[in-house]
């Protein structure tokens, strides 16, 4: 059974819409079952 791998991302990693795609790419290259924690997100007007 694969172990969970925790990935924590804060607001500085989520400044622009394309940042989600970059984060998804990082996670997809890591072994294990991803568990993603977003500690802060910046709102967009």
Image (cartoon, rainbow, N blue to C red):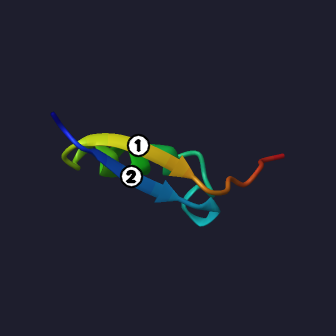
Residue 3 location, quadrant: top left
* Residue that appears at 77% across and 47% down: 44
Residue at 46%, 45% in the rendered image:
36
Secondary structure state at the residue bearing disc 1: strand
**18 vs 12: above or below:** above
Q: Which residue is mark 2?
A: 6
Q: Return the x and y of residue 41 as percentages of the image width and height.
A: 68, 53
Q: Quick check: 10 above or below 21?
A: below
Side (left or right) of 37 relative to 39? left
Q: Which residue is mark 1?
A: 35
Which residue lies at the image location 15% right of the left edge and 33% below the top edge?
Answer: 1
Picture mark count: 2
The residue at the point 54 percent across, 61 percent down is 13
Q: Counting other residues with Cα less than 10 Å from the Cα at mark 1, is it few (<14), some (14-19), or many (20 or more)?
A: few
> In this view, which residue lies farthest toward the left?
1
Do the numbered discs 2 and 1 sit on residues whose CB atoms are within 8 Å?
A: yes
Give the CA separation, mark 2 to mark 1. Answer: 5 Å
The residue furthest top is: 1
* Camera-nearest residue between 11 and 2: 2
């Amino acid at each position: 059974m694969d172990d969970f791998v925790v990935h924590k991302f804060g607001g500085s990693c989520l400044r622009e819409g394309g940042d989600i795609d970059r984060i998804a790419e990082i996670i997809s290259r890591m072994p294990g079952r991803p568990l993603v924690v977003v500690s802060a997100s910046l709102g967009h007007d």
